[in-house]
Each structure stands twice: as C-alpha cells, then as structure tokens.
C-alpha cells in the first residue's frame, strides 16, 4: 500500500518521504508509547529509573519474542524438511512480543523489588499506541491482509504486494495487477487496540494500579484478535484444527486471566474474613474490659445497645446464581469449517432463554429456546435452536457447562445466483463460566462442534467456539 501512497504524494507535488514505511511506524510507536508511559510514571510518583530499565527490557524482549514465537511455530516444519530455511522466512508474532515483553518486565522489576502490576497498568496507553502504529505499518507494507470481500470495506493492494501475488497464484487475478478487494484487517486491529486501551484506561483514571487496566486491555485485545483472525486471508500464519496460532493464544490468554481473577477473588475473600475475625476479637476484648470495669449489669446493657442483629448466612455468588430459575444468555464466537474449503469462515452470535432445574447443591439442568446467527463474507445464517445443558459447580465462582443444541437454520447467500437453503443443525459444547455477581456470569466455551445436514448441502461439520458468553439470571 505504501507505493500507492507514494505515487499519490508525487502526483500532488509532495515529498514521498511523507509516506512512512513499517520501520518508521515501529519507531514512532516506541517513541510515543514511551512518552505516555513516563508521563504516567511521573504522575504516580513511581521509581522511573527502575521502571525505565524495565521498559527497555520490554522493548528488547518484545522484538526477540516476536521472532522466537514464529521460530517455535515453524520448528515442526523445519524438522520435517530437515532444513533451517523455514526459520529465515518468518515475520514477527504480535502475541510473541506481548508475552515475552510482559515476562521481561516482571523479571526486571522483581530484581529491583518492585511490584509488576502498577508497571503493567501504566503500559496500557503504550500498548494501544504500539499496536495501532505497528498494525498501520503492516497495512502500508501489505502484510497480514484479509479475505476478499464485496462490501464497502474492501481495499485493493497494488501489484507485487503479498495479497496481489497470492491472488494471482490462485488464479483469481492476472499476474501483475492489483489484488481483489480484501478486508483491511490490519486497520481493524489497530482501531480495536486503541478502543481497548481507551476502555482499560478508565481504571487508570480512577486511580487503580492493581492490574485491572492491564487485564482489561489483554482480555479485550484477545477477544478482538480472535474475531479478526476469522477475516485474515494470509495463509502462512499457521492454522491447526481450523484455528490460527493467534486464536489458540487468545483462548489461552482469556483462560489465564479468568484463573488469575478467580484466585484474586479468593484471596480478597480470605482477607475480608481475616479482617472480620480481627474485628470480632477486638470487640470481645472490649467487652471483657467492660465486664471487669462495670460488672455484669453494664455488660448486659452494652450487649443490648451495641450487638447487631444476627446476619443472614452468606452464600457464594455462584451458588446464588445457580439457584435462580430463568437465565438469558448472549454469546459471540467464530464460525469455522475446517473440512470444506469452499465454505467461508465467519462470526457467530446468539441469544437464548433457558429454564433451570437444580438437581443438587452443585448440579443443575436447563432447557431453553433461542436465536442463532452466523455471518461470513458470502452468506448469512439465521436459525432457531433448543439448547439443553448441565452446569456443574467447581468452586465458589466457577462452573463447568456441558450442553447439546438442536435447531433449524436458513442459509442466505449474498450472491443472487444462489437461492437460500434450509438445514437442520446440532452441536455439542463444553466450557467454563465465572460468576461476576449473584445474577451475572461470563464464560468462554472453546469446545463447540456443530453439524448441519440437508439435501442441498449434504452434511457440514463445523467448529464454532464461543469466545464470550454473558448470562443474566432473572428472579
């Protein structure tokens, strides 16, 4: 894309160096990101000398980690070919840079006996700026392009670009011409990274430096990256079982954040219990002193005046959530068809209402009805479904969900040359849900396998992981 921008600048009498290349965008990202970080560090009164060293380690580790992650990905191919060539034909992994950089920061700060979470929170604006500029650089370089699209969002990459070369190799366009219109997935990711940083920065504005901002950015980025990967058209980024390497990492990041959040909630609950015990002990000592000073009569008066009413027994939010009878659930995820290359991948969305039947203290059954939709760049799926499920509590804040779904789907093709078709649909799924309160739970269902059947499409197996579910219990 940069050559087209340079041609436009030349035609209007402007210097072509105004069109930045990928390296310039990376440099600008590092400079502006560091400025935002040190502004926050100065405002927070942090140890800027030590955190500056940590930031330098982040940049070095992110650069190295981007390559190391790609080398790990192509290692099986290198062993199969008995050659080192695959190691010299890879780019850099954004996730590799993110994970290695975060680990490097934690190690450096530990050496200086400083907490890592405030530092990671202060990197949130840096992360938004970095991913926005670097992905814009990818757009200018023409890498990481999307699948073809006939929508108004499509952009054409010039002749000689990765997209044009790939499309010519498939016979879609003649050699030496620009590509088909494709999704600008690089710009999608750049914009969503900035939006994630803006949302996560709300924690910074409220004064929180306990890891919430960093975790929020990581979760939002993982969700958006998983969705964007379904629109990617470059085939050299690594795909297994219908998912790209980045999608597997996204699932891992979300599950790690969920586990860490659960552990922190348990630690906070234990701390509250300890504070309550200490308060009760102080009250007992005060009562004992009052007894020794004023006698039993004064103690009776003290108890009558100061003793609180018996508190209701507290139950875990997960237990309260499970005991409610009606549940509304919305979900978003991916639509992947690993066995039929003529069927395009896309996104799914759904809305269900279910009635629960508790079976025991930790197990419940539920049955419901709902709507399901899927969207690819060449078709839209609209259907009704009947979900059946079992929820098994595995802690105060978590449960395993296993379910099956039966339904009916109408597939509408964007092309006027193909009529819509009907199909019966079914799926099996498993995942985890975490209660936020006694009425709200969020979850991730990475194992959702579907099957469509009709005389028009025969049988179509699919993989439809739900990246995010939001459940609200109705009294």
Image (cartoon, rainbow, N blue to C red):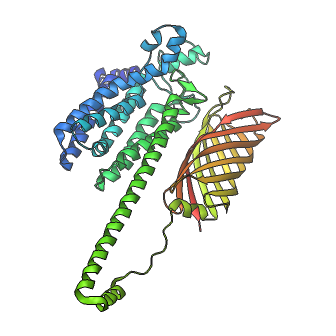
- Of the pair 255 and 194, the residue shown nearer to us: 255
Residue drawn at x 41%, y 42% as measured from the top left: 218
Please give the name of the residue rendered at 48% of the width and 34% of the height, measured from the top-left corner: 249
Where's the N terminus, which quadrant?
Answer: top left
Point out residue 328 in the picture as x, y percentages from the top left corner.
61, 58
Q: Is 153 on the left-hand or right-hand side of 260?
A: right
> Is residue 413 among what the camera can see?
yes
Q: Is residue 300 above or below residue 161?
A: below
Q: Quadrant of residue 35?
A: top left
Measured as percent of width and height from the top left, residue 413 is found at: 70, 37
What residue is at 60 percent from the left and 36 percent from the top? 346
Percent across and percent down for residue 163 are 51, 21
Between 240 and 12, the one nearer to me in the picture: 240
The C terminus, quarter of image: bottom right
**In-image side of 451 versus 472 (left or right):** right
Residue extending furthest right? Answer: 455
Q: How many marks?
A: 0
Evaluate whether residue 4 shows in this view: no
User: Which residue occupies the foreground of this view, 404 or 277?
Assistant: 277
Image position of 10 with respect to 388: above or below:
above
Q: Quadrant of residue 104?
A: top left
Q: Which quarter of the picture shows residue 173? A: top right
Left or right, 409 with reference to 48: right
Residue drawn at x 57%, y 35% is 151
């Amino acid at each position: 894309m940069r050559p087209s921008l340079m041609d436009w600048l030349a035609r209007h009498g402007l210097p072509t160096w105004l069109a930045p290349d990928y390296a310039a965008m990376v440099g600008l990202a590092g400079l502006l990101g560091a400025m935002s970080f040190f502004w926050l560090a100065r405002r927070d009164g942090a140890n800027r000398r030590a955190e500056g060293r940590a930031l330098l380690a982040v940049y070095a580790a992110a650069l190295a980690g981007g390559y190391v992650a790609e080398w790990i990905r192509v290692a099986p191919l290198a062993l199969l070919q008995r050659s080192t060539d695959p190691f010299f034909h890879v780019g850099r992994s954004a996730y590799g840079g993110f994970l290695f950089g975060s680990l490097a920061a934690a190690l450096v700060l530990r050496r200086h006996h400083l907490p890592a979470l405030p530092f990671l929170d202060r990197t949130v604006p840096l992360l938004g700026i970095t991913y926005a500029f670097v992905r814009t650089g990818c757009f200018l370089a023409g890498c990481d392009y999307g699948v073809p699209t006939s929508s108004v969002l499509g952009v054409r990459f010039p002749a000689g670009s990765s997209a044009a070369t790939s499309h010519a190799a498939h016979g879609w366009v003649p050699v030496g011409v620009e590509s088909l219109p494709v999704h600008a997935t690089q710009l999608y990711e750049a914009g969503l990274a900035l939006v994630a940083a803006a949302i996560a920065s709300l924690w910074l504005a409220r004064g929180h430096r306990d890891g919430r901002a960093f975790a929020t950015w990581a979760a939002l980025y993982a969700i958006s990256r998983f969705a964007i990967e379904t629109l990617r058209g470059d085939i050299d980024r690594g795909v297994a079982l219908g998912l790209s390497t980045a999608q597997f990492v996204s699932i891992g990041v979300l599950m790690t954040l969920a586990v860490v959040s659960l552990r922190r909630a348990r630690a906070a609950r234990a701390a509250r219990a300890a504070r309550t015990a200490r308060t009760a002990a102080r009250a007992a000592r005060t009562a004992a002193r009052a007894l020794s000073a004023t006698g039993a009569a004064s103690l009776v008066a003290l108890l009558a005046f100061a003793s609180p009413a018996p508190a209701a027994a507290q139950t875990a939010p997960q237990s309260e959530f499970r005991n409610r009878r009606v549940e509304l659930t919305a979900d978003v995820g991916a639509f992947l068809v690993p066995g039929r290359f003529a069927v395009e991948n896309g996104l799914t969305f759904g809305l269900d209402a279910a009635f629960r039947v508790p079976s025991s203290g930790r197990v419940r059954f539920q049955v419901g009805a709902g709507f399901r939709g899927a969207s690819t760049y060449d078709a839209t799926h609209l259907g009704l479904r009947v979900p059946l499920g079992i929820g098994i509590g595995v802690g105060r804040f978590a449960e395993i969900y296993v379910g099956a779904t039966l339904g009916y789907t109408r597939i509408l093709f964007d092309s006027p040359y193909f009529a819509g078709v009907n199909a019966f649909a079914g799926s099996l799924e498993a995942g985890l849900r975490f209660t936020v309160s006694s009425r709200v739970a969020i979850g991730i269902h990475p194992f959702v396998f579907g099957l469509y059947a009709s005389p028009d499409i025969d049988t179509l197996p699919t993989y439809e992981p739900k990246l995010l579910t939001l459940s609200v219990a109705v009294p």
